[in-house]
Image (tube, helix red, strand yellow):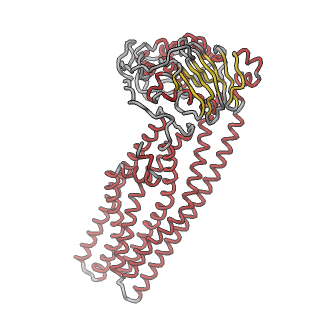
Amino acid sequence: MAAAQTTGPRRLIVQTAMSVKRWLAPATALFVSHQLCEVAVPVVVGLVIDRGIVDRDVPQLAVWVAVLVAVFVLLAWSYRTGVYFLVNGIQRAHHELRMRVSERSLDPRGFGDRQRPTGELLGVGGSDVQRVAFGGLLFVHPVAELAAVIAAGAVLISIAWPLGVAVIIGGPLFLLLLDRFGRHLRARAEDQQRLTADSASLAANAIAGFRTLTALGATGRAARSYAEASQRARVAAIATRRAEAWFVGVSSTATGIFVVAIGLIAAALAAQGSITVGQLITVVGVVQVVMGPMEALAVNVGAVWARAGASAKRVLSLLQAPYAREPRGGAGPAVDPNAETSGGASARECPIPALAVPVGPTPALAVSGLTGEHLREVSFTVERGEIIGVVADAHDAAELVGLLGGRIHPPLGTITVDGLPLAEVDADRLHELVTAAPHAAHTVPGTVAANVVGVTGVAGARRSPDDALAAAAFEDVLEQLPNGIRTPLGGAGRTLSGGQRQRLALARALAAPAPVLVLHEPTGSIDAVTEQHIGERMRTATAQRATVVVCSNPQLLVRADRVLVLRDGSITAEGTHEELMSTDLHYAEAVA
């Protein structure tokens, strides 16, 4: 990560390619061989004509036909083998960079500059990383294409030196002009990718918070926001494609004129008797062959580089983002989710020294003047055994959960757990104080039990998952699984439905021993009957901890000790569910 702090977009593309140089180097050599064979074909054909057909020399004809066959065999083998090395190298570079972006996105230290929506993270980790990895093509194809241009120039110099000089000198100058013309395209590409990412972020966030948006009656506003962002992205995409079409069209036309001019000069030399018939065919063939590499060079230097450079900027904006907090100690030991547990589950004993928590009459959770991108001076406290509900729109809810979980560092305000400021806790120790369960439900490779207690990585992980699974109303699912809590689920948990995965994620959060629990729409994909069961068991399951439930589900809110209503980033109302239903119209509409 330290290297990324001083890396520019172009250097990132180079570094990504160099990380797989043991694959790209042979790929480059093989593609160079392929291009040289392409140039050699018209040369050998010219020799077949001059030394075999024109001179009626059968042995020479046989020799040069055999050479022509050998050139074709080498040409085909070089291309096929080169593709093998190139694809392997690009895919490995893609994987390595994607892992770097994923690790940074999931780093518990979070982002210290701003909150990054899920859609943005998915866009950077997906299409942007792919474009940067495919920038490695610029270190293979252009090299081979340039080799073809140089070889063609050498052949033409041996036949008529003015033709060779025109190719060798005119080619690079032509590329420099195209690179300057491509700056406009690069700017367009950056603008398009930014706007596309914005619209993707809005869509992802709207889907993640669809239930909340529906409850708040804000789906129409969210749809309009997405439509506007999508329209901006569409206009930018059309402008980019138009600029790219002009770029490719101008470069192709200019290249064609350049090559045709050389062909006409060669024809004039043949008419004067300065070159033979075979040499004329060689010149025409070489010119036709070199036309492809020259056009490809123009496109690679322009369009491919423009896209890779724009994406590299976005990738670096994530990799170089400051942390919300810096670690002051080593990372705590991990827990093997498949190790044996005392409850017949999977986990390994993994003692971690306890944090020095102040002792005294302080609330379990105290939030004071919390201000972020959307929140404005939010303050509240939660005692152990107390449950408070929070009703907020999607942006406010996501930011509050991120702040309480320590994933985002607040510009203003403080969060303390048992009197200990959250900002002073090492990123790898946050889980000992706060369990902030995301809205999305994920599983890990391992058994049901391992998914509940084997991934917490804290002291107390050896306890049985039965209580947590019961609190999450997961018993009916266990009855359907062949081996109960010992049933392996696989990485994606495809054997479970969306609601069952969410109940499993809720059980995992309830099993974690942190004194503060933050839940974000924990029953959003669960049917109403099961929601009621979970609501009835919530009090017992959270009796020893401070619990914040950010949702719009009345089955959970009715069991909260009090409910906070967040509107436009600020607390606008507070009371029990019954009180707010009768006194706050906005709240009543949100949870109806």
Whether 160 is drawn above or below 5: the answer is: below
Measured as percent of width and height from the top left, residue 23 is found at 33, 51
Q: Residue at x 51, y 17 (%)?
A: 515
Determine whether, in the image, residue 415 is placed left or right of residue 585: left
Q: Residue at x 42, y 44 (%)?
A: 97
Question: Which residue ends up furthest to the left in the rendered image?
Answer: 59
Measured as percent of width and height from the top left, residue 570 is found at 68, 29
Measured as percent of width and height from the top left, residue 283 is found at 39, 77
The mark total stands at 0
Q: Residue at x 58, y 35 (%)?
A: 411
Determine whether, in the image, residue 459 is placed left or right of residue 253: left
Determine whether, in the image, residue 409 is placed left or right of residue 589: left
Question: Which residue ends up furthest to the top in the rendered image?
Answer: 540
Q: Which picture quadrant has residue 272? A: bottom left
Q: Residue at x 57, y 39 (%)?
A: 114
The residue lying toward the viewer, choosing from 169 and 395, is: 395
Q: Which picture quadrant has residue 276? A: bottom left
Whether 128 is drawn above or below 463: the answer is: below
User: Could you tell me if residue 494 is visible in this image?
Assistant: no
